[in-house]
Image (cartoon, rainbow, N blue to C red):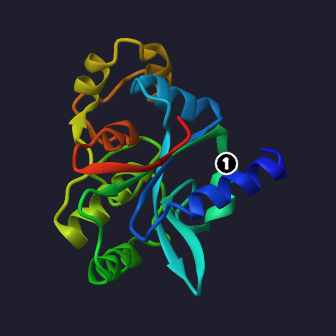
Amino acid sequence: MKTQQLDLLEQQVKNSISEGDIIFISIDSFLYRQVAKGTGSWTSHVGFIVKENDEWFVMESAVPTVTRCRLRKFLARTTNNEVSIMRVKDGLTADQVSRLKKAAQPRMGKLYHLGFKFDSKRQFCSKFVYLTFKEALGVEIGKVQTLEALLEENPQASVNFWRCWYFGLIPWQRKTITPASQLVDPQLRTVFATR
């Protein structure tokens, strides 16, 4: 992304956000494009926004671990300026934001699960957001479902890709959760979107 475009996007985002907002982007890599295609959505990555020492960050589970990323660096990874920022409908209090940060801390540094297995000690982006919000606020963002149900709902998904990804055998009953299911969760409202 060109510096001027990134400057403008970063400023627009900063003018819209609050701590605890959930941010969705689209990463231009083969795996992430397949994630988006397989879920019938444009988005392939998600995290949530925090502010520390007057600077904005995104808490995210990315390869290889759960980390805290500067907002600008996070935005620079999106394709075609594609960003959506969602907020829990009633907004979050300072106490709720504090609980969210506290719930994220034990997950920092946890390894990424490239097989997107929900029932694992490892994390992936949408699972990290789901578990952190559930633990801190009792709010379940998105839909946990089996790979079988996910692929049945999305006939445009490349089953051949996922068969290769899972070394020939798709674990159909494996539970997972997607950024796409979180983007459309009715508990959230849009505060900023370029799409």
Q: Nearer the viewer, residue 144 or 7?
A: 7
Q: Looking at the image, is 133 positioned above or below residue 120?
A: below
Q: Nearer the viewer, residue 32 or 96?
A: 96
At a point 41% along the width and 61% down the height, the residue shown is: 21
At a point 77% along the width and 47% down the height, the residue shown is: 5
Q: Nearer the viewer, residue 131 or 191?
A: 191
Q: Position of residue 46 (x, y in %)?
A: 46, 50
Horizontally, residue 5 falls left or right of residue 112, namely right
Q: Position of residue 72 (x, y in %)?
A: 68, 61
Horizontally, residue 69 falls left or right of residue 122, namely right
Q: Nearer the viewer, residue 104 or 41?
A: 41
Quarter of the picture containing the N terminus is: top right
At a point 40% along the width and 23% down the height, the residue shown is: 40
Q: Is residue 21 visible?
A: yes
User: What secondary structure is marked by label 1?
Assistant: loop
Three-letter amino acid code at the position of disc 1: Arg
Q: Looking at the image, is 128 positioned above or below residue 97?
A: above
Label 1, on which residue? Answer: 77
Q: Position of residue 32 (x, y in %)?
A: 55, 35
